[in-house]
Amino acid sequence: MRPGSNAWNMQKGVAVALITLILLPLVSADTGSPDESRDAVGGHAILLEHYTATWCDSCATVDPWISEFSDSHSSRMVRIALHPDDHDPFGSPLTTKRVALKQTDHSLSLPTFWFDGQGELEGVVSESLLENQLRSAESNRAHWIGMQVSWDTWYRQPQGDVQKISVQVDDLPENAEITVFRLQTLMMNGEIANNGIDVHHDVATQMITFSPNGTVLDSFEGEHGWILSSDNALSEGDTSVFALETTGEINSFVTVVEVNGTVRGVIGISNDDMPRKAENFANFSLLLLLGALVCSGVISRQDKFH
């Protein structure tokens, strides 16, 4: 036996063991883990409900910049676009229900804006006017209810993506109502008469409202429907937990807590919020595997010269 061969064999054995240890978690990884997860914490945001329509010429002067306004104030507010259930391809009974809550005693103009369900603004508005109304809504919010939202996605094409959302609400009053909206960016069909705006952002396409004990009070299923967890309203101390599931592509969710008709908590979560790629661990393990293989190759080459 060549001098030092035992040492080289031992080093090769260590390399093989290292490779095995790296491969083990890859083989035994939980295949049920989500492909992507996101988290958001808050509740202090102001809810901007924007009543607009694809056929409204006045709306066409506001819609091009309202999304940028919303993005630039994303730490302070979230926007929901409500389209009327009348000659609008993006309209639904969801809008009728939300508008009815405003208890307006007159016919609404398009567009119309509400901040936390109050501060109604009608017609073509300026960014400065919306900014002033946002500040007013913030000063009127006596206090807010804290929330944490987790959103997991399983990509299952062509069957359809699976979306699961978990909402944790702190110190939830017994007379509160929790509403979750599904928001999407929708494209106009060229065959439908419109106001020249082809892309419409933050369109509410689904809604569900439930009580603190998990009882569904109202629901608009949209095209994809809702599935509620059997342990909804599971309490963890002073925190209530609600779990929902739906399918298809989604741009964002918005959760609103209202107490006696007054908005007390708002949080939005979008595809851009704090992504945690589930495949990151696998990629890191593959990098370690590559390093181990390189080490093994170096050991083998050195062995040839001994």
Image (tube, rainbow, N blue to C red):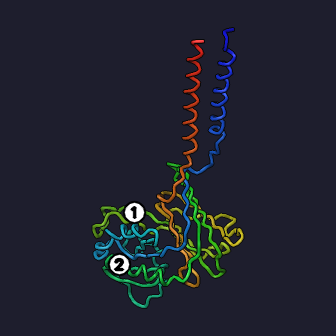
Tell me: 251 left or right of 216: left
Q: Is residue 132 visible?
A: yes
**Type of amino acid at the residue the image marks with label 1:** Leu
Name the residue carrying label 2: 111
Q: Position of residue 130 (x, y in %)?
A: 37, 78
Quadrant for residue 284, please give it.
Answer: top right
Where is the N terminus found, in terms of image quarters?
top right
* Residue sitting at x 59%, y 66%: 148
Name the residue carrying label 1: 186
* Residue sitting at x 44%, y 68%: 74
Front one among 173 and 211: 173
- Numbered disc 1: secondary structure: strand
Q: Position of residue 252 (x, y in %)?
A: 48, 63
Quadrant for residue 11, please give it.
Answer: top right
Q: How many marks?
A: 2
Tell me: 270 left or right of 106: right
* Residue sitting at x 67%, y 14%: 5
- Numbered disc 2: secondary structure: loop
Q: Position of residue 141 (x, y in %)?
A: 51, 82
Q: Are marks 1 and 2 in contact (CB under 8 Å)?
A: no
Quadrant for residue 288, please give it.
Answer: top right
Q: Residues within 10 Å of mark 1 (few under 14, many from 20)?
A: some
